Image (cartoon, rainbow, N blue to C red):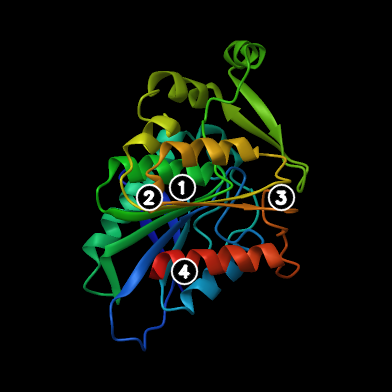
């Protein structure tokens, strides 16, 4: 495992983990994983999952979005001590961050043992939505994995939108840390001003590459119907929907990591099979 930091086109830090077997001389499939809302690359079960997938002959890249709220100047930040950045984050920023990372990996493809022409994008929750959008707009991506993915970003009612615009921000409670995490009105403006680029369902209709969608029936954050909606929009001949009984939004994982679950192991197994198929 190797931690690196690069700058996006705006000069902000992308904090990146690379996991791979350097003894394997062949070019490995390249998996890039996107975390979700109030998330980070080292949340809970994510490092465990990335490590296990990498041990199956996959070059795995996980990273923190530049404005995710952690201090990305540190190697493995797990605290939200940059809430000023979190407040300014937008979906378009995350899409651009991901594009900058893919550009970097393409530029460095001769320096690592990954096959950039076998690029798989994965994302959890909000990160799943970002992964879907990027797959639709970037022909370099050859497969897509959506884990408990949202099917739309505009999840706010009229009253919330009205208050958001009047106050200039809204706050989301982090139930784990008890922090009130501010989101500036620029996030809402991003949805309104970039509707076509941020239309997840519209993006899924355009995707022609294989897609793996995984969802738990007890997910309280993203309803199972969203996974079904996404699956019904993609090319079913190339795609697979896995609905997992008795598991929730993080497939039984928690932060800090308290051990694996049957659901986490199934996610890993399905992902490895999908990547190598």
Which residue is labeled 3 in the image? Answer: 248
- Mark with earlier residue (3, 1): 1
Which residue is labeled 2 in the image? Answer: 237
Element under disc 3: loop
Whether 156 is drawn above or below 12: the answer is above
Dot in front, 4 or 3: 4
Whether 12 is drawn above or below 168: the answer is below
Instruction: Give the CA separation, mark 2 to mark 1.
Output: 36 Å
Whether 90 is drawn above or below 140: the answer is above
Which residue is labeled 1 in the image? Answer: 66
Q: Residue at x 53, y 64 (%)?
A: 270
Could you say where residue 269 lies in the image, as x and y percent from the top left? Answer: 55, 69
Visible in this render: residue 86? no
Dot in front, 3 or 1: 3
Q: Tell me if mark 3 has few (under 14), some (14-19) or many (20+) residues whose alpha carbon lies within 10 angstroms of its own.
A: many
- Mark with earlier residue (4, 3): 3
Could you say where residue 94 lies in the image, as x and y percent from the top left? Answer: 43, 42
Q: Are marks 4 and 2 in contact (CB under 8 Å)?
A: no
The numbered dot on residue 273 is 4
Q: Residue at x 29, y 40 (%)?
A: 137
Q: Residue at x 45, y 35 (%)?
A: 91
Could you say where residue 168 lies in the image, as x and y percent from the top left? Answer: 58, 18
Instruction: Give the CA separation, mark 3 to mark 1.
Output: 27 Å
Dot in front, 3 or 2: 2
Visible in this render: residue 226? yes
Dot in front, 4 or 1: 4
Quadrant where the C terminus sits is: bottom left
């Amino acid at each position: 495992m190797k931690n690196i930091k690069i700058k996006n086109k705006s000069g902000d830090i992308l904090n990146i983990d690379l996991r791979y077997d350097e003894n394997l001389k062949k070019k490995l499939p390249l998996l890039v994983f996107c975390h979700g809302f109030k998330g980070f690359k080292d949340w809970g079960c994510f490092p465990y999952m990335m490590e296990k997938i990498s041990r199956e002959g996959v070059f795995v890249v996980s990273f923190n979005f530049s404005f995710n709220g952690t201090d990305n100047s540190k190697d493995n930040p797990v605290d939200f001590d940059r809430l000023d950045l979190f407040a300014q984050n937008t979906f378009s920023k995350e899409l651009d961050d991901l594009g900058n990372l893919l550009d970097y990996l393409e530029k460095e493809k001769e320096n690592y043992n990954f096959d950039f022409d076998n690029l798989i994008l994965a994302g959890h929750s909000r990160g799943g939505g970002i992964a879907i959008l990027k797959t639709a707009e970037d022909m370099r991506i050859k497969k897509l994995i959506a884990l408990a993915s949202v099917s739309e970003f505009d999840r706010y009612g009229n009253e919330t939108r009205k208050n958001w615009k009047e106050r200039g921000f809204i706050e989301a409670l982090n139930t784990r840390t008890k922090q009130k995490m501010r989101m500036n009105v620029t996030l809402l403006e991003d949805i309104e001003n970039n509707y076509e680029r941020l239309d997840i369902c519209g993006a899924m209709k355009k995707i022609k590459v294989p897609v793996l969608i995984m969802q738990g029936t007890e997910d309280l954050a993203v309803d199972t119907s969203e996974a079904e909606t996404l699956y019904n929009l993609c090319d079913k001949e190339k795609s697979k929907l896995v609905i997992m009984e008795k598991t929730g939004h993080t497939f039984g994982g928690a932060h800090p990591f308290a051990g694996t679950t049957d659901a986490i192991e199934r996610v890993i197994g399905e992902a490895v099979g999908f990547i190598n198929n």
